[in-house]
Amino acid sequence: MSAPTTLDTHRVWRLGADIDTDALAPGHAMKHGIDIIAKHCLEAIRPEFAREVRPGDVLVAGPNFGIGSSREQAAAVLVQLGVAAVIAPSYSGLYFRNAFNVGLLLLTCAEAETLQDGDRIALDTRTPALRTADARTLACEPVPAFLTDMVEAGGLLPLLRRRMAAKKEADAR
């Protein structure tokens, strides 16, 4: 998935603060593959989420998104479901890195909680900023280029594979 731009509009799924990794990837589903775990994503908070989320939708949450265990599946399920980005005022450090490693865009936005469930927003990852349907612009913290590169490549491993292939091709010339 490539990083969203202002050309894309996204439906907001609004969550509260302190969303933990157990809510994103419940322990009872961890014995299965990511496709099954994704079907249980957020079932304790938003039972309809995994069934109704659509590719390109975004999660908007309060502070401390992704607290809890370091399970990578908590970020990978959102990629599996097609979530374009998570927007929150703050994240768990482990979740932050896991998300980018699997190709999930996280935007840190102090005003994230002003967005409501069902809002439509446009993302501008170059600025970065969010533009609301009522013409408000919400600034986000800059995302370092190396992390944006990971999202555009689909995660760290695809990015490394791409770089290795380019190096091999350059060396062959």
Image (spheres, rainbow, N blue to C red):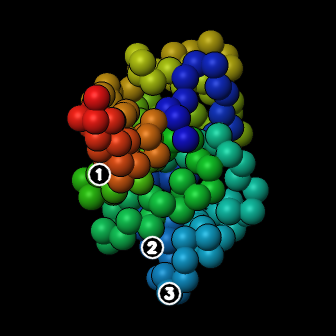
Whether residues under marks 1 and 2 lie with C-beta atoms below 8 angstroms apart, the answer is no
Horizontal and vertical percent position of residue 124: 50, 20
Location of residue 55 (image quadrant): top right
Q: Which mark is residue 31?
A: 3
Examine the rendering and report whether any part of residue 49 can be seen. Answer: yes
Q: Is residue 1 above or below residue 39?
A: above
Three-letter amino acid code at disc 3? Lys
Residue occupying image coordinates x 40% and y 49%:
158
| Closer-to-camera residue (26/134) | 26
Dot 1 falls on a residue whose secondary structure is helix
Compare marks 1 and 3 and give the one earlier in the sequence: 3
Give the left or right position of residue 130, taking residue 92 as reference. right
15 vs 148: above or below: below
Residue 136 occupies quadrant: top right
Question: Dot 2 corresponds to which residue?
Answer: 22
Q: CA distance from mark 1 to mark 3?
A: 23 Å
Query: Where does label 1 land, which residue?
Result: 97
